[in-house]
Every structure is written in structure tokens, then in C-alpha cells.
Amino acid sequence: MAIDPQLISTPVTADLLHGALEIEETTVGVRPHRLPGWARAQGDAQLAMAESQPSGVRLAFTTEATTVELRATAVRFGYRGAPSRPAGVFDLVVDGRLAGQARLDTATTVLIDLVTGEQEVLPGEVAGITFDDLPVGGKSIEVWLPHNENVELVELRTDAPVRPIDSHRPIWVHHGSSISHGSNADHPTGTWPAIAARIADGDLVNLGLGGSALLDPFTARTIRDTPADLISLKIGINLVNTDLMRLRAFGPAVHGFLDTIRDGHPDVPLLVVSPLLCPIHEDTPGPGAFDEQAMAEGIVRFRATGDPAARAEGKLTLTVIRDQLAAIVRQRAGSDENLHYLDGLRLYGHDDTDDLPLPDRLHPDGATHRRIGERFADLAFAAGAPLSPASPSR
């Protein structure tokens, strides 16, 4: 992309970025992170990949510019033998409305071998996206970064000065799995948390971490230490499809996770959300796995490999987790009036599978993300709902 010398160059700094918890300086620019460095050091490679993908992170500023350019470099992950994923999308939002979309035309590609775990890196380079012919006059602009690829931001270029936005909206911190991260959503403002946040006018901090909603203590401490007016936790699917723990460990782990968050946010409205419907894991434990036969046909699909009879030995399924979460919240709510429970089947349940089945048997598609986001906004943020300013407990 040719660089227009007439444009003003603005470094990407923390005051321009919303939804990131840490900004790492790199050799070419800055990389937004959704977990702080001390937490990243306690995780694994899957967590490192997930948290560095800036789901919910956006540049936010006011300006009179009619041209906005962003120079950046991206890292895209793929699996050898699986279909290539589409390039990540940058969403332009002007005065609250989606006004444009763009993709970087080059990126570093990391191909992961599903059998050996080995990675092949195909290097890319810095590229740019441009949004022009924007409305004349002052306006609020957000550039939402791709939810599904790592990006390093080099510089913001505009034809008029930019000013950071000091948001006074309530900060909503949400934690969940790849579904909250945005897997299979079409674009960054099309993930269900982004949809719900925009309906509710909330300032989203999305800690949806693909494959990594595992009740990790460092995640609880991160939420504890992050400013928040509203908190939601979507717990369950990753614990089943990783086959991480048994029933005896699950209850104390949930209590400990909540205890840690309450150490920093004793009175903040906190909504515990149980898993959405996922037929392969409703009554069948994990671990989950790729469907090899589908992969041979170039189709990504998941399957459950556990034995349903193993529930008697304490293996977790989604139905077990829903029952346990409801019981834990009932127990704790007696002394915590700001703790609430939402059954995930109310967001996506049995009645939704006919018209909106899960394409890969695990993740919702774009239309389903919209349905989930709209329902969450109604069930969590509407007047009198658990995360509403009008809720009696607030």
C-alpha cells in the first residue's frame, strides 16, 4: 500500500486502545494483549495464541478526518490438512454504526500439525488498510481489530488530528471459551459479546479465550485486578472438551474462581452463565477431538470421544455442569445478592438447532452469534436483568 505523505501519523498508544489489558512494544509497533504478562507466563501455547488475538479490542477516537489508514502486521494460525481460515476483518464503526470493513492482504502464517504439534512459519510483512470518503465533520470512530488473528499495530494515519475517547460507559468484563472469543463469527463486531455490548452500550473487555476457559487461577486474578462495573463468566464447554477435571474438583474450582474475583469486586454484579447447547457433549464426556473422516474431506468437524457411562466416575458433561453451576450460585447467593445465574440453554438451546445448527458441531456461525448476543442483551442487560443499572440489587 502506497503511503500518503499528506496524512498525519499518530502512534498507537494505550489511550487509543479499548479492551486490551496490556500493550507490548515490538520491533515494528505494538501488540495488544488480553491478559497481562505475568498471567501469560503461567499458561500454555494454546492460551498464548488465544489471548493475543484481540477479540473485542478496538482503536477509539474522535476526529474530523475523512480518511483513516492503519498500518499493521498480522499472524494467522491454521491447521495442516484443514481448510484455510478467512483473513481477519477490521470493522470500522462511525458514530456507533458499522461503516466499513477491510482485511490485510498479507500476514505471517503459522501452520500447526495436528498430529505432532509442530509449527511451520511462513513470514509476512507490514501492510495497511484504508477507510476513506468518511462523513465530513466531527465524529466518533472505532476500528475493531480482527477477533481471530494476532496483530501488531504500526501506526494510525489520518487527514485530521485524532483525540482519544474517554468512555463513561459501564465496563463489562466477560470471560468465556472460544464461543465468547468469537469462533466462526464473520467479523469482530459480529461476535456475540460485541453484539450484546453494542446493544447495551457497554464498554467491553472480552476475556473469551479459545480453548482456555479452564477456571485458571491467573484468569480469576486478572479479572479481580481489572476495573469492572459488570462481570459475566461463561463456564463449562472447555472443561468438558479438554477432559480437564472430575466432578470433585469442579465445585471447589468454581468457588475458588468466584472467591478470587470477589476479593477485588465484592459488590459488582456478577453473572454466571452455564454452557450453550452442544449436542455432542450434552451427555458424553470429553475429550473432544477433530473428526478425522470429515477432515479427510476438507471439513472441520468435532466429536466427543468419552464414554457416557464414565459420568458415574465423576467425568463432566454439559448437563452435569449446568446442574452444578445452578446449585453453586444458589448456595452463594444467600450471602451475595449481586451474584446471578443464567442457563446457557436460554441463549442457544434445543429449539434453535433446526434453523441454526452448529456447523462444526461445536461453534455457532455468524447468524447464531447474533441470536446469542441479542438474547444475552435482553436477559442480562435489559431493565431489571442481573447486569442492568435498573436491577434491584444495584
Image (cartoon, rainbow, N blue to C red):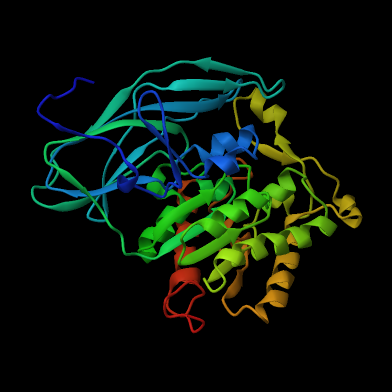
Measured as percent of width and height from the top left, residue 24 is found at: 43, 35
Query: Looking at the image, which is closer to me, 77 or 374?
Result: 77
- In this picture, residue 367 sits left or right of residue 265: left
- In this picture, residue 372 sits left or right of residue 6: right
Residue drawn 46% across and 32% down?
150
Query: Looking at the image, which is closer to me, 145 or 279?
Result: 145
Hey, which quadrant is residue 370 in on the image?
bottom left
Query: Looking at the image, which is closer to me, 122 or 34?
Result: 34
Say if 196 sits above or below 18 in the image: below
Measured as percent of width and height from the top left, residue 361 is found at: 64, 44
Measured as percent of width and height from the top left, residue 258 is found at: 65, 64
Residue drawn 74% across and 58% down?
253
Q: Residue furthest bottom?
A: 392
Measured as percent of width and height from the top left, residue 34 is found at: 49, 44
Say if 80 sits above or below 54 in the image: above
Residue drawn 41% across and 34% down?
88
- In this picture, residue 355 sits left or right of residue 103: right
- In this picture, residue 46 sits left or right of residue 7: right
